[in-house]
Amino acid sequence: MSPSSFAAIDAKNSKEVQADSPADSELTELSEMEIDTVPEVPILDRTLANLRRPATEDSCAFWYCSYAKWQDWLRDAQQSDKPKKKTARNNLFKFDAAGRIMETSDGKVAPHPCRWCRRENYDMVCMILRGEGEMVCAYCKRHGKGGCNAGRAEGSDASDDGIESDEGLQRVSALESLVSELQHNFEKLQESHEELQDDHRIYKNGWHKLQEELFELDQEYDKLREELVSLQKFHQDLQEGDQAELREDYHSLREDHQSLREDYESLREDQQALQATNRALEVELDGLKQRMGTHDRWLEWFKSNYYTATRDIYIMWMKLWPTSARAPPDQPAI
């Protein structure tokens, strides 16, 4: 079919949608009742403010999304639960893109219908986003299909044979699962990194507090030393008086000064221990940053060399696995 025939079918579908049938009126009434019963979720995330719920009320349309489901996704997308938040955000962006392509002027008829739309035998025209060299159609955006090439022009030499290969799809799926696992491990490392940063902040605050207490003790020590000097002068002036009583007061003051000195030395030792703990935490934090960097490099390497790595692992397995242990062609492998 040519693009002109696609446009004619698109115009016909739009007229059918705009027709005032009893089924459409019932769907509109149900939608209004649903909006009245389901509370609207406030949008606090700026990235979700410009999303648009598809306006179609045809529940058979692949881009249809009910008001209640849309509000549930908005609520989950703003929660702290990371898996639920990620799933909700993906659904919101998929339905927003599909609705804009199928219902607004942002969409246009694809020059080459993709294999998924041909396989599903939809009466709807295969449409893509207008401009920007977009290749993925609305149906593939909505369902997360891979290998969509609806945006390439007719007569192109591009072929879908490589995409149709089951073995290639299995390899890609396995590598995608590996990448997903690595991303999950990276998120765990990032969470532990944030926890270590919080612990480091707590120890740092405690260290500053001990420094303030040490400064206050230094001031008290200077004050007591001044009092000691004044008492020594007073003792010298009253040597002819009751020297025994003055000597007892003097020794008592010296004992107090010694105890204060010991407390001062103890606080200095505590400060040094806290500084050593702080340095150990910084070393552990640097090690975690290095492990995160190694993880990032492995992730980039797997993304760019997944085909070569899979081929080398397969060749290594064929060399290491003995021929006698392999199953005959007519029997399943053990």
Image (cartoon, grey):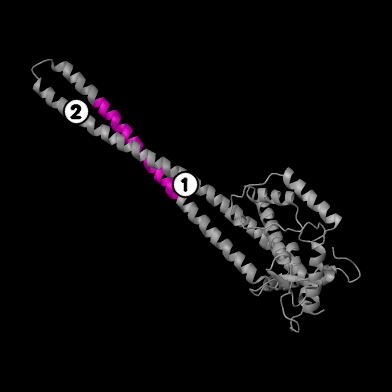
Give the residue at the far front of this rendering.
Answer: 20
Residue 87 location, quadrant: bottom right
Identity, as a three-letter code, of the amino acid under mark 2: Leu
Numbered disc 1: secondary structure: helix
Answer above or below: position of 323 versus 185. below
- Any mark on residue 228, and which? 2
Give the residue at the far right of this rendering.
Answer: 330
The residue drawn where x is 22% and y is 23% is 251
The magenta segment is 254-280
Q: Is residue 160 left or right of residue 206?
A: right
The residue drawn where x is 71% and y is 66% is 101
Q: Is residue 85 visible?
A: yes
The residue drawn where x is 63% and y is 71% is 304
- Whether the magenta-drawn stretch holds residue 262 is answered as yes
Q: Is residue 49 left or right of residue 32?
A: left
Could you tell me residue 222's position as x and y percent? 23, 34
- Any mark on residue 9, and which? none
Could you tell me residue 105's position as x and y percent? 69, 68
Answer above or below: position of 35 versus 261. below
Could you tell me residue 237's position as x and y percent? 9, 22
Answer above or below: position of 27 versus 202. below
Q: Is residue 316 visible?
A: no
Q: Nearer the viewer, mark 2 or mark 1?
A: 1
Please state which of residues 27 and 221 is positioned toward the viewer in this rendering: 27
Could you tell me residue 278's position as x and y percent? 43, 47
Residue 207 location, quadrant: top left
